[in-house]
Image: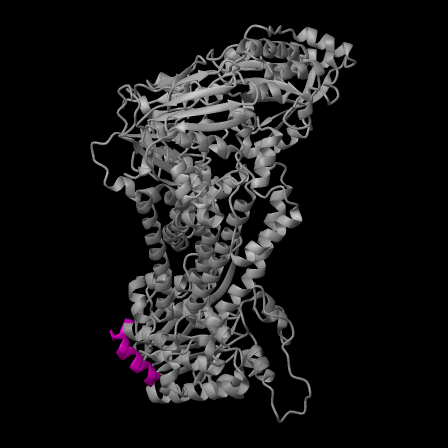
Amino acid sequence: MKKIVAIILALTMVIGITACGKQEPAQAGTGTADAAPSEVVFYYSVNFEETNWDPAYWTAPDDTGLGSVIYEPLFEYQADGSLKPALALSYEISEDNLVYTIKLREGVKWQKGYGEFTSEDVKFTIERQTDPEVASINGKNLNVENIASVECPDAYTVVITLKSIDVDFLTRLSMFYSFIVCKAYSDKEGKAALNTVPVGTGAFEYVSGTLAVKTEAVANKDWWGDREGGNIDRLVCTYIADENTGYTAFENGELDILRSSNLDKTREYVGKGFTDVQSPKLSLLYIGMNMQIAPFDNEKVREALFCAVDPQYYIDNLFYGTETLAGSYIPFGSKYAITDYFKPSYDPEKAKALLAEAGYPNGLDIELWGGNDAHGQAPVIIAADMLQKGGFNVSIQLVDFGVYIDKVRKGEIPVWCFYNTTSNIADDTISRYKSEFYPGNNWSGICDAEYDNLVDAGFAAKTEAEKAEYFAAAQKRLMDLTVIYPVTTNSTHMLCQPGLKGVKIYGDLSFRATTIVK
Amino acid sequence: MAENKMLRIKDLRVVFPVGGKQIHAVNGVSVDLAPGEALGVIGESGCGKSVTFSSVLKLIQSPPAMISGDIELNGRSIMDLPEKEMQKIRGKEVSMIFQEPMRCLNPVEKIGVQIAESLRLHEGMTMKQALNRAVELLKMVEMPDAEQRIGCYPHQLSGGLRQRAMIAIALACSPKLLIADEPTTALDVTIQSQIIRLIQKLRKETGMGIVFISHDMGVVASLVDRIAVFYAGQIVEQGNTRDIFRNPLHPYTAGLIKCIPRLDTESRRLYTIRGSTPNLTTIPEGCCFAPRCPYATETCRTVKPEQTAFPGGRSCACHHAASLN
Amino acid sequence: MISYILKRIISAVPTLLGVFLAVFFAVRMIPGDPAEVMLGANATQEQIDIYRESHGLNRSVGEQLVIALKGFATGDLGTSVSYSRPVSEMIGTALPSTIELALVGVVISSVIAVGLGVLAAAKRGRWPDILINILSTVGMSLPTFYIGLWVLTIFASKLGIIPVISNRPDIPHYKTLIGPVITMVLGLTLVRTTRSSMLEIMEEDFIRTAKAKGVSRKSILFRHALGNALIPIITMIGYNLASAMAGAIVLETVFVRNGIGKLLIDAITVRDYPMIQGTALVIAALMIAANILTDIIVALTDPRIRVTGES
């Protein structure tokens, strides 16, 4: 009898839990249950999902996988650096370059019935950057401290007054951190509501999502914009952490598109008839040194390292010709990047000679650090091999990102090989190497008064040309210090199923399914 | 005569291969049992008595064991019977009870169910009928509160009660032969005598034959008609109980009898047979008992003694049997 | 029995507190800061400071401990640093999926493994035994993710029976379990336990009794031997269930299933302290629950244990 009770107990648990388990996907998929069969569904994935839907917390436009199709900025950043009106129609800048009068698009509807988009939403979006309750991390990016006031003379006009000239202010308004959020929604549901469900004006409307699992969005029928023939009715964005699983799913046709960080795989699939879309080059592969740590405080040692690196080898063997020489530590896709200053000369014999001059005739022991992910390891191993030939005795330290970033910020890593992505305005990367940011974001320990002055002058510039001039000078100064070796450009690859049309990666590296024809 | 025997074992040999060596557990045992007869089987542990009678139910896994000779039950040889046929004999014609009732009962099944299993197998009873019969059987083995006890698990019973349950299982299908393999060895002395009396009573009531295996001459004395003394895988002497006790022919038998503690002796020390049982991996040339025998001569050590018949249906394998007599 | 269960549950509380404290300090000892990891390579100190302040990371470890302990006492697991959502809410969404996977996987793989173990014991030393032994050795020695990837390649890519991405709306629910369950079955951890317990019990005296009663070989194997071997087997299944809760980490990652294991892995990557603490605590609680459940089922199966528990 008791045995039967035991068996029944066990079975009940199994069945009970199985039933619970069944309920949950049904709930998650309520939006799809009644989907019309003719609906065109676009499947894609992200490999890491930060599921906070509030752009105030994002560090990139695609943190959520869907952010840049749900929200829209006032202006859309184009790959060539120009701006295209989005929620804004036109703008006027006062003669003193401090007052921006922006005319807004009329008749734009907020999703989920939150009424019409107005100037109040723009004011709200900007002002919440300084709201301690919101605790936005992007206030600095928008340079919000430089904004004196935001006024709304009428529903379709917004007037922004700056404290001092900011030649990139309009560009800032085109970035993901300036995505306009809905005031009526925040007022009604509370400030934290923006974390959980996004309400935007964009081409797609959020339907449902399970955190760290997947998100679904449907085409916004009221969208003002032009889909250029795109026919996607529904987006399903799945979170796939394991790289191999992603490739298997893509090959199986379960994903229409796959962000591919393995170039060997990318080439293999292109060979099989899939297509590859490459992003603008807003990232680069570089070798950095900390010039505060011996022996890299010795200029001869740094020069020796520069001589030992062969960027062409990377281009030919790691990137199969899809990338080019970097030219500066600011990538090409970024404003103010200089493109032709850095001319590396590969000469391992000279490297050895320089090391001998520096007092290391029998070679120099160094620890080369890098990330332990599949994507990050290969360049480190290649670099170690090259440096070995140039007279360095390299031991490799591959660690996880958390450990790496902690140590490098504390100034505990002497030399590393890493990828770096810069925003469209180069401000972040240019300014991080100022002396005040060491230890911290200035990983290389560059404490150079001349560089600091050039950067400050760039930020104070009254015109774009002037800023470009100072920033170019700053970059040259930094390159002359021979402390950051920009090896090659680096870009994202999107593998597409055959027949997929209209796939674009935008100038801000965002991927939007709006124009896709499936 | 031969047709009248219910059990006939002829020149049984059992060899166990163990780690490259061979253990000759049983070395040419021949013994008979008439219907209703009670045979006592005496010998020290490891002398082959259990193996011999386990072979009657083919409980010895073969292979690995190598079994030769012949065993007949009611005139039918079981040596080549298929497993299915043996299953019909086991528990139905011949039953067996064992030494440690705790370990011989299934610990996770109730007593009643364990008794019922045989009845359902051999008598085709339903569970309900079988359980009713189980109560009767428990009453028959004098189990107190039989109705309640069928719902008990083995660990809830005392050693004596467990052995009664074991006997009830064995007797469930009224077998013609009960092989009791040291059924009292693990029990207290008072319980021992209760069980012996019970077996005596049951024998009278059912008229079944009994093979009572024990290492203790004293225990079997009152119970059996005939005694077979085992030593080193052989029978060294058999005969009527009374004859054997009065006049043991084999020095080993004599030793065993001397080992029984008696109240009427002057001696303060218990008698022991010096030495220990031989290693069964090799069969010695001469008499197996010779190394321990006080009467051993050169002949004993080199020439194997044959079974010799003596008056009164007795037999003995000893060169000196006649002279000792 | 009920008082016994209560006692077990109460005695689990100090264990859980111990786990909680151990995890609390362990995660803070790993180099790396949640704000630094979340904000990435280009984060300025200013951004990091804002992030740390808004997520309570600027407080001293002592203060954080007090807050965490208060939360532990009141059942509040805090707010995830990376998701900005209550940890309990995140776990609540993920938990049914993990428990479902663990239970279904363990039940199915147990039935198969016990079957194979009994077969191996019955055919001891002959080819089925040898074959099963080889299979289970291979299964046990290969890492789960490796088996998982092969299952994915074979069943999803080559045969097209199962989906790679489990949480698609157009996939029937049962199909999403096939891949992980096959992987768990191929692990075959229970085969050896079953085989050895069966062989041990087949040597017991009561098996000889059953044989002497005339019980058939099949009945001896399944009723008498397996009936007794079930006790070590259930104990092992319970252990498997407990480890399956933790082992779900790998399966959930490979088979793109929602679940608590995946939450934990992500949380460790980004140093999401409250999430690591919460998921580790829940996994520990599940393991303890699986152990208690096992003990209860064993007690119900084994009459000997039940009586001592009662007395």
Q: Is residue A227 magenta?
A: no
Q: Quadrant of residue C230?
A: bottom left
Q: Is residue C15 above or below residue B266?
A: above
Q: Is residue C131 left or right of residue C52?
A: left
Q: Residue furthest front?
A: A153
Choose between C213 and B287: the one closer to the eye.
C213
Q: Is residue A371 left or right of residue A363?
A: left
The residue at 56%/42% (across/down) is: C55
The magenta segment: B121-137
Q: Is residue B126 magenta?
A: yes
Q: Quadrant of residue A155?
A: top left
Choose between A116 and B212: the one closer to the eye.
A116
The residue at 29%/82% (across/down) is: B132
Q: Is residue C105 above or below residue B287?
A: above
Q: Is residue C268 above or below residue B267?
A: above
Choose between A70 and B113: the one closer to the eye.
A70
Q: Residue furthest right?
A: A359
Residue A276 pos. (x, y %): 38, 18
Q: Is residue B321 visible?
A: yes
Residue A411 pos. (x, y %): 69, 27
Q: Is residue C161 left or right of residue A239?
A: left
